[in-house]
Amino acid sequence: MLKKFTWGHGVILALGSFIAFILFMILVFPNGKQNADLVTDDYYTEELNYQQVIDAKNNADALPEKPVYTQKPDGIYLAFPQAILPDNAKIHFDLYRTNDSNLDVKKELQLDSKNSVLIPAKVLSAGSYTLKLKWQFQKKPHEIDYDVQWK
């Protein structure tokens, strides 16, 4: 014998569906959650000093020539034009891995005789990086960012 579908059955069906949806969101959805690492642990302090970063990027934008990077099998080469050689021939670079902060690389290096520097392939993993290049030129800070896809 078939029962007639009443509004009470509809309420129970709606509540059951809602409970099933909530359980799905709680149990299944978090499994696809991505890593949400911060770029830095002391971001409040860095936020207060961010005007210096803006000034350094504006200084770099005003340069007639900019440093360039090239990818080769043995690593990433950073080359500086003769017109904008850094003070003391030192540069600082940060390679931020966009999905895993454990793969970040931060170093200060000395330019070689060809006004270039090599970031070796052994410190890189395949994936997407943000390369932040920082240097002093004519006693002013300069900074430029590149998006790098290492294969």
Image: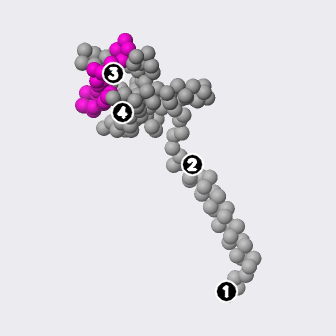
Query: Can residue 126 be seen at all in this image of the molecule?
Result: no
Check residue 125 in the rendering and tell me which mark sits there, or answer none: 4
Q: Mark 2 or mark 3, which is nearer to you?
A: 3
Q: Mark 4 or mark 1, which is nearer to you?
A: 4
Residue at 68% x, 70% y: name it: 14
**What amino acid type is highlighted by mark number 4?**
Ser
CA distance separating discs 2 and 4: 26 Å
Looking at marks 2 and 4 on the same chain, the residue that comes earlier in the sequence is marked by: 2
The residue pinned by badge 1 equals: 2
Residue range highlighted in magenta: 65-89
Looking at marks 4 and 3 on the same chain, the residue that comes earlier in the sequence is marked by: 3
Residue 137 or residue 91, whichever sits in front: 137
Q: Mark 1 or mark 2, which is nearer to you?
A: 2
CA distance separating discs 4 and 3: 30 Å
**What amino acid type is highlighted by mark number 1?**
Leu
Mark 4 touches mark 1? (CB < 8 Å):
no
Residue 98 within the magenta-colored segment of the rendering: no
Q: Mark 3 or mark 1, which is nearer to you?
A: 3
Crowd around label 2: few <14 · some 14–19 · many ≥20 (10 Å): few
Residue 14 or residue 124, whichever sits in front: 124
Q: Position of residue 61 (x, y in %)?
A: 40, 31
Residue 151 or residue 88, whichever sits in front: 88
Crowd around label 1: few <14 · some 14–19 · many ≥20 (10 Å): few
**What amino acid type is highlighted by mark number 2?**
Pro
Looking at marks 2 and 3 on the same chain, the residue that comes earlier in the sequence is marked by: 2
Crowd around label 4: few <14 · some 14–19 · many ≥20 (10 Å): some
Quadrant for residue 116, please give it: top left
**What amino acid type is highlighted by mark number 3?**
Ile
The residue pinned by badge 2 equals: 30
Crowd around label 3: few <14 · some 14–19 · many ≥20 (10 Å): some
Residue farthest toward the top in the current orientation of the protein: 88
